[in-house]
Amino acid sequence: MSEVVRLERHDVVAVVTINSPPVNALSAAVRGGILECVKDAVAVSGVKAIVLTCAGRTFIAGADITEFGKPPKPPGLSEVLLEMENSPKPIVAAIHGTALGGGLEVALACHFRVATRDAKLGLPEVKLGLLPGAGGTQRLPRAVGPELAVRMIVGGDPISAADALKNGLIEEIVEGPAAGGEAFARKVLAEKRPLRKLRDDDSKLAAAKADRSIFTNAVAAMTRRARGLEAPFAAAAAVGAAIDLPFDDGLKKEREGFLKLVASDQSKAQRYAFFSEREAAKISGVPDGTKPRKVERVAIIGAGTMGGGIAMSFANAGIPVTLIETGEEQLKRGMGVMQRNYDASAARGGIPADAPAKRMGLINGVVGLENVKEADLVIEAVFETMAVKKEVFTALDKFAKPGAVLASNTSYLNIDEIAEATLRPQDVLGMHFFSPANVMKLCEIVRADKTAPDVLTTAVSVARKIAKVPAVVGVCDGFVGNRMLAQRGKQAEKLLFEGALPQQVDAVVTRFGMPMGPFAMGDLAGLDIGWRSRKDRGIKSEIADALCEAGRFGQKTGKGYYRYEGGSRSPLPDPEVEKLIDEMLQRLGRNRRAVSDEEILERMIYPMINEGARILEEKIAARPSDIDVIWLYGYGWPIYRGGPMYHADIIGLKHIAERLSFYARETNDPSLEPASLLKRLAAEGKTFASLAQTAKAA
Ligand code: 3H9
């Protein structure tokens, strides 16, 4: 008998239990085990019904993603599902945890489905650049209708057990999966319910067959944000086939689409991103078995944009927060912003109507640093100057309870220096959230010189608890993300001096797939911030300075690198800016030249990759994939391009090193010379990914 799937007989009911930790993914062994057990249960006389359930934390979470791209191993999932669907004895899927992807497809091939109250059901394949490849696009629309099917398949988000029940995806909500499944199977037998094969039931397709706009409108709504991605469109086409074609022809279409996507560069990049995200949560250099400290209450210092966003992230996860300000006025303003944010989300239907009150109820706004005393984790989000930070940490040392983790949300300051302001540097580290902190998923966890291992694991586990993606980095100016971004910013500005316009540079960057170009981003953040900081440091940036001197601070003043009409956030090219650039160049005695889009793209991306290589050399990041995770979740790098280091491997490091040397020469900029690591890998014909493999083997 299979090691991962077992068959037990409880008189007339046979129970097939999958036990393949951690998530019961459909590896070849699991597929084979299900097939064997179902065949056995069908063959045994006296067994009248079969329950399919899982041991451990979850029902089947999908196909085994590690098998994609390798030679297929029999039996195929579709073969297993056919055997199940054609079983003459009713099969009940008893779901708990998450029934995802191939897991939900297994359940859809069963004749009945029940689930526990906290279960989630979904087809998230699009998030891996795929479409459901084992009948999901054909059976789900028949179970719940094409509208919801499009939302689940093209959007990729799961639904709750309650929604599944409401929409006919499950028959009942049960207390425990195995016992509930068995009780339901006995009910099916007692009531002599006919086997329900979704393949034979077109009733929920009728409306969309008569009026195709039901389907096309649902697709339009779900693909609005799918720019550049292939999978959502292919997935929508497969659902369309469920409406237009007989079941078996629809299955064929689905299969074709799946096979094409599984071999695509986009899906490879997205699968890489999936595993990179999970790898990033594993901290190198920490002794095995290091346990995180307990975090039941968090204190956040500063109720400004960052502090408020961080507080919301904790409240969203149900963790109580003490939000601390220096005065009532600032506190009131901060609490007001959060309340308005929550109310707007509830009005949009993004969160339940009672969520704003519940979540605000978890945030206790107070004045005075002494209020940190109950917190297990303190996150400082005050003004970005070293003197202020040190003052706060010295005070924290006095008030925070022993063993509390003390984190700074600084985006570039030296955490080692901040830690010295306390007598407990082992408890200090950076937790760098990205703006808006309640939305952006990245949290750079900055390991300082003296940070204790369990403090690091605490920060990583807390970040995951509040649905952030943590990536551990070392101390340096700007850490990983902003340090690389600075290289792009420098080149963007130089391109203006050579003849490119902001709209040309931004268009190239957004065509590549980034949500915004550097100039539109500058306008959004406010150009006055950089201007003031340059003044403080005695640095000049002629064009940016001239814009600010003309009162063009970006979106907030309606003008920056672009103009913005009537409070709109859409950047419009501004001839005045072109004139200003022309005049500036004339004054500096420079001629504008035509800069090609290709050059712009290379100069926007390659210097960042080069900086990434330096970051790896200096061991500021442990793995190239950690850098990719930072760019995917902190800066909106297009997921179908995997991240800057992954992208570099795809392009080829030799080409990148050559182009960097070329631009270093042509633009007289030694900082563009390839980093020694990049040069070495390029010369050896290797990739950044090879570094991770070597590290693992060591
Ligand atoms: C599919 O099904 C295609 C079919 O339509 C067609 C087939 C023909 N495979 O996330 P966690 C590993 S596509 C292999 O930290 P959580 C994961 O790498 C698939 N491994 O836990 C990690 O390993 P490690 C559609 C998998 O509790 C460990 O399990 N399904 C898979 O935070 C724990 O994972 C999906 O896209 C897998 N499918 O979250 C679901 N899933 O410990 C993908 C997980 O070595 N999975 N692992 O780092 C998830 O969304 C989350 O893992 C889940 C649990 C919500 C299930």
Image (cartoon, rainbow, N blue to C red):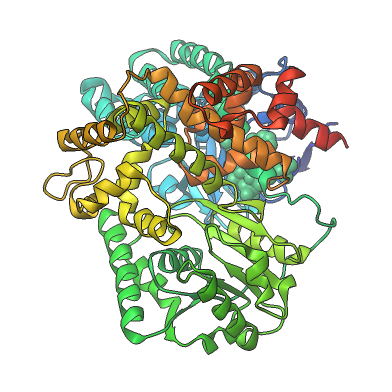
Q: Tell me where residue 194 appears, x and y as whole percent.
A: 50, 32
Q: Quadrant of residue 531?
A: bottom left
- The reply to whether residue 128 is visible in this rendering is no
Image quarter where the C terminus lies is top right
Q: Residue at x 59, y 59 (%)?
A: 463
Indicate the quadrant of ligand 1 in the picture: top right
In this view, the residue in front, 213 or 274, is: 274
**For this view, does 138 lie left or right of residue 15?**
left
Horizontal placement of 122 versus 590: left or right? right
In the image, what residue occupies the spot 65% across and 17% down? 654
Residue 231 visible (yes or no): yes
Q: Nearer the viewer, residue 232 or 213?
A: 232
Estimate the x, y position of residue 432 in percent, counting from the top left: 55, 58
Q: Nearer the viewer, residue 575 or 158?
A: 575
Of residues 606 and 375, the one nearer the viewer is 606
Name which residue lies at 34% across and 20% down. Answer: 243
Q: Quadrant of the N terminus?
A: top right
From the top left corner, tell me how far across and down residue 154 is, in percent.
41, 31
Look at 35% across and 60% down and name the residue there.
Answer: 352
Question: How many callouts does the rendering have?
Answer: 0
| Above or below, comparing residue 124 to residue 55 in the picture | above
| Relative to 535, residue 73 above or below | above
Q: Is residue 593 above or below residue 557?
A: above
In the image, is 345 to the left or to the right of 317? left
In percent of width and height, residue 427 lies at 71, 72
Query: Residue 491's image quarter?
Result: top left
Name the outermost residue toward the right. 698
Residue 566 to residue 571: above or below: below
Image quadrant of residue 247?
top left
